[in-house]
Amino acid sequence: MKTKLLIWFMLGLALPSYGVERDYVDRAILTELQEKEVIALAQECGIGKVSRISSYNMYPTPFRGITVRGVEQVKGREVSCQVLNVSYGKWLEPGARPQKEQVQRGDFWAGKPHTRKKIILRLSKKEYRIGSLQGMTGEECEMILGLFLNGEYKHEPAVNGRMLSQVDWSKPISFSRRGEFISAGFLHKTKDAGFFDLQIRLAGKKLTIHQMFQAIP
């Protein structure tokens, strides 16, 4: 095994994609050879080790894209990693081409990676990661998330109960305090179906949903 890896290294090729997590949408699944091409491209762009490759739809267009993520670095509640957006010519509009500053390998190209940071919430030995937390503590968010997960909440008449059944309480994306209200974001149960923004009131441990908005891609 070591000899094989040494040969890959001497030839300047990307290492095989063993141990890399994958999360592909329909109509955007890479073959093993394409994955190796994408990993090599990511390394050229500055990501030392790839931990995850995923694809996504660019709604409302028919085009698709690729995201490559590096190894996570955890410090307290904060987790960060490098993220690279990769373009694949066959999944874009006809005539799409890389820009001058971008790196290209075959039909794939990308620019520079950016750093993505998230906040870790912990409940019952499980971790939930949110992209934004403003005006609140992690402990406050954990309490609210726990109430949602346990179904311990009420909603005002203006809130559509049928829409609430479509919220994935296990996938929070943000929490923020806005005056007397708290804004909480959650993904839709169906992948790529958008997210919900809930305006809530919290009195002690009594949680009431005041308003609900849905963002549809």
Image (spheres, helix red, strand yellow):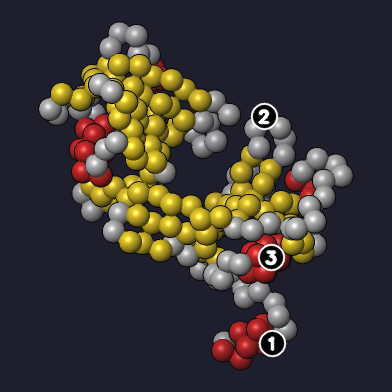
Identity of the amino acid at label 2?
Pro
Indicate whether 208 appears above or below 11. Answer: above
Of mark 3 and mark 2, the one earlier in the sequence is 3
Name the residue beneath numbered marker 2: 60
Quadrant containing the C terminus in the rendered view: top right
Vertical side of 94 occupied by 72: above or below: below
Callout 3 amino acid: Leu
Tell me if residue 22 can be seen.
Answer: no
User: Residues under labels 3 and 2: Cα distance?
Assistant: 27 Å
Q: Dot 3, how many residues are within 10 Å of its Cα: few (below 14), some (14-19), or many (20+)?
A: many
* Crowdedness near tag 2: few (<14), some (14–19) or many (≥20) residues, C-alpha within 10 Å: few
Mark identifier at residue 41: 3
Q: Do the residues labelled 3 and 2 touch (CB within 8 Å)?
A: no
Residue at image point 33% right, 33% down: 176
Task: Tell me the SS state at disc 3.
Answer: helix
Residue 189 percent location from the top left of the image: 44, 33
Q: Residue at point 74% right, 52% down?
A: 88
Residue underneath mark 1: 10
Q: What SS does tag 2 mark?
A: loop
Give the foreground label among 3 and 2.
3
- Measuring from the top left, give residue 201's x and y in whole percent: 24, 22
In the rendered image, which quarter contains the N terminus? bottom right
Q: Which of marks 3 and 1 is nearer the N terminus?
A: 1
Question: How far is disc 1 from disc 2 in space, using C-alphas?
Answer: 44 Å
